[in-house]
Amino acid sequence: MANIVVVGAQWGDEGKGKVVDVLAPHADAVVRYQGGNNAGHTVVVGREKFVLQSIPSGILNPGTRCVIGCGVVIDPASLIQEMESLVQRGVSLDANLYISKNAHLIMPYHPALDRASEAQAGDRRIGTTGKGVGPAYADKAARVGIRMADLLDERLFREKLEYNVRQKNRLLREIYDAETFTVEGILGPYLRFAGWLAPYITDTALLLSRWIDSGASIIFEGAQGTMLDIDHGTYPFITSSNTTAGGAATGTGVPPTKLHGVLGISKAYCTRVGGGPFPTELDGAVADLIRKRGNEFGSVTGRPRRCGWVDAVGLRYAARINGFDTIAITKLDVLDACETVKACVGYRYRGEVFTDFPEEETILRDAEPVYEELSGWQTSTHGLRDYAELPSKAREYLERLSELIGVGCSLISTGAVRDDTILMAGSVLKRWYPGL
Ligand code: IMP
């Protein structure tokens, strides 16, 4: 029984939601371990499109239990809305959704602080989703955060809320000249949320440990991507959690010794939303083509995504940091129209070529990509389900990519729906999930 971590290898939006949805019927549970409602995991089932923000993508598979781990930050209003919308669309949550008692809450002052600090940041603006994720994690690290369990203890909740409202109001008023909050204005709605969420809140680390002991197979679903990791990403243009595989252990309470493998997900090209370095970013016709064909607009914010060629230097780094056993390449069909396709194999900076991912902010910002160019295939791969059916040039591209990253490919996605998927015979993924 495999416990597998699914991690984005780029700046998020790699298609983790779709891959998890494909794997979920072969697992007993799917667990989210970090991030919050800044994520937007798009899953298309039949003609229906679901965008999941805090709830694991496994929820669309009846019988797969879903857990929101302690490493996630939760905006209760947004979570309840997501739950209601799933229920309205016929998805069952009873005995299917579990929320960690230790997960921190996003409070109304967090999005306010997020927006206020962004408004003052000028060139250093991160381009956050504005959901309050960074400020909520800042409170967690500063040991003044409020957790799900506190929501169930009215006295303790009020005590922590009073302290925070006093502190945040000073910040909002004196530093940011922004609107302030009242304890009563937050207490009422949050106590109502508590009533709603109470049946789902539990000790999820204990639950997961019991499930694992009884032989369950668990998928750990990462949000965002490696390059947005707070320690290993393009700091400070990152999100505020550990998006990389190590986060799966700390963000759930499942020990690293119980994790069996890591699956990295990368698009056949690359995108980024928000500010920060992106060495292979393109503008002009190719970027427009990718954005249009790939529908590269943020699923949470609607922002147009920055688009570029695949960055094999970054992907090899992601493979090293996460310990990818195998990779999945998504959205191959988006490149069908390209005459040539390129992969970045080095960064040129002040006359030197770096083939190992540099961590220095200035090198990343000013580096020029060194490309390897391959011919495009200029024929439709959309919806193909068999590797042998792919045009030979597409196979050459995928094989070269795999070689550059240093990891074998297990799955190729050729479209949005579950079935637009090529599973590689004899791959690591097939070994983990023999029923695939
Ligand atoms: P935050 O997570 O809202 O604080 O945003 C920090 C950075 O991470 C910004 O550049 C966001 O655009 C980016 N980001 C956050 N969540 C996602 C995601 O789910 N996909 C892609 N980028 C994201």
Image: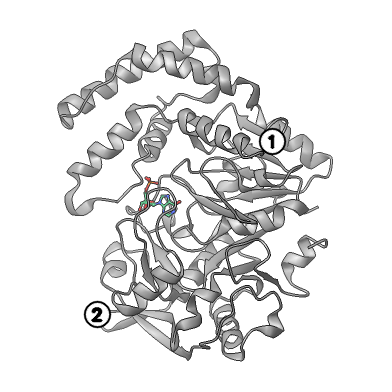
Q: Residues within 10 Å of mark 1 (few under 14, many from 20)?
A: some
The reply, left or right, for residue 250 in relation to residue 136 is: right
Q: Residues within 10 Å of mark 2 (few under 14, many from 20)?
A: few
Mark 1, residue position: 92
Q: Quadrant of residue 373?
A: bottom left
Q: Which residue is depicted at the point 18% across and 32% down?
A: 176
Residue 98, how many percent across, how many down? 65, 32
Residue 223 is at least partly visible in this image: yes
Q: Which residue is depicted at the point 59% across and 75% down?
A: 382
Sequence-wise first label, 1 or 2: 1
Q: Quadrant of residue 16?
A: bottom right
Residue 357 is at least partly visible in this image: no
Residue 114, how many percent across, how many down? 30, 38
Position of residue 116 relative to residue 352, above or below, is above
Residue 225, how many percent across, how many down? 48, 57
The reply, left or right, for residue 329 in relation to residue 190 is: right
Q: Amino acid at mark 1?
A: Ser
Position of residue 60 relative to residue 383, above or below, is above
Mark 2, residue position: 350
What secondary structure is marked by label 1? loop
Q: Quadrant of residue 202?
A: top right
Q: Quadrant of the C terminus?
A: bottom right
Residue 21, how many percent across, how many down? 66, 54
The reply, left or right, for residue 337 in relation to residue 421 is: left
Q: Residue furthest top?
A: 155
